[in-house]
Image (cartoon, rainbow, N blue to C red):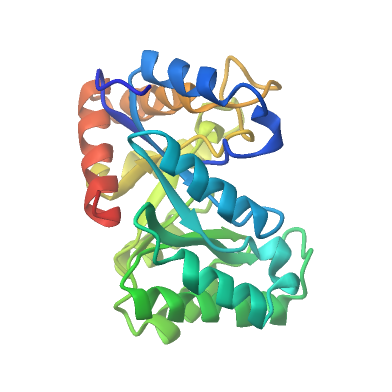
Amino acid sequence: MLQSGLGLIDSHAHIQGKEYAGETAAVIQRAGEAGVGGIIVVGGAGDMSSNTAAVALAESCANLYATVGMHPHDAKDVGQEELRELRELVGHPNVIAVGETGLDYYYNHSPREVQRRVFAQFIRLAEETGLPLVVHERDAASEAVEILRNEGAGNTRGVIHCFTGDYDSARNYLDLGFYLSFTGIITFKNAEPLREVVSKVPLDRMFVETDSPYLTPVPHRGKRNEPAYVRLVAETVARVKGITLEEVAHTTTRNVQQLFRI
């Protein structure tokens, strides 16, 4: 059971995955003990089963919420049947966003033209349902901004999860009205350029996340990540900005609540 405490929200975690089999309750409990009051369980990584698992987990525990979509790595597997299933899932009361979706030109596990087509389809789904987007973007900032601008007509709300770009890219997303979410990467020794971006992005446009089980922050780097460690991300934001952890927790949680309407 999550507790109030500091009231942080881990805005992006995949704790429905096999990495947590048999341990989910303990992981959620540790998160609560670390001051985490909510977790966004993100679907769409791997196959459709991650979406149904995210929804089921959100149903099972208060202050857990689900998103449904398909990671750009797997865009090649999105057909009419998958879109039909997703249209059904977005109507579930525990589903608060469409995603993750987006573009990943670093790995190119799906052809770029397919990624662009599927991303546009999910933007339209978000528009139709009134839900915000959870966007994954890597090495594709200019095209992602262009597609969001063209398909969303400037009306699409959302968050760029695991932001790792430069400040120019950050400004382009902020100008579209999107939030930027930061992970344990900002704790890494070689992440000074990203911490510089953190210093410039307004706190009222920021989320914190773990992207569990990936991107584990220092000093746990190399181990499986979990939502309790979002506190380490928030502590780094506080240190970079010269403010208190409590201010980071209060503001980022308010941001998440405003975007996702929770």
Residue nearest the observer in this picture, 63 or 178:
63
Q: Residue at x 58, y 27 (%)?
A: 188
Q: Is residue 244 visible?
A: no
Pick whichever, 11 or 244, lies toward us: 11
**Image spot of residue 163 (x, y percent):** 49, 50
Coordinates of residue 105 in the picture (x, y in percent) = 70, 65
Quarter of the image for residue 254 reads top left
Instruction: Indicate whether 232 appears above or below 16.
Output: above
How many badges with numbers are in the image?
0
Tell me: residue 253, above or below residue 172: above
Q: Quadrant of residue 102?
A: bottom right
Q: Left or right: where does residue 36 sit relative to residue 211?
A: left
Residue toward you, 152 or 29: 29
Please state which of residues 81 and 14 is positioned toward the viewer in this rendering: 81
Relative horizontal placement of residue 216, taking residue 114 as reference (left or right) = left
Give the quadrant of residue 238.
top left
**Residue 179 falls left or right of residue 220:** left
- Can see residue 190? yes
Residue under the point 38% across and 22% down: 1
Point out residue 112 in the picture as x, y percentages from the top left corner. 72, 76
Q: Looking at the image, which residue is at 34% across and 67% down?
A: 131
Vertical position of residue 19 compared to residue 128: above or below = above
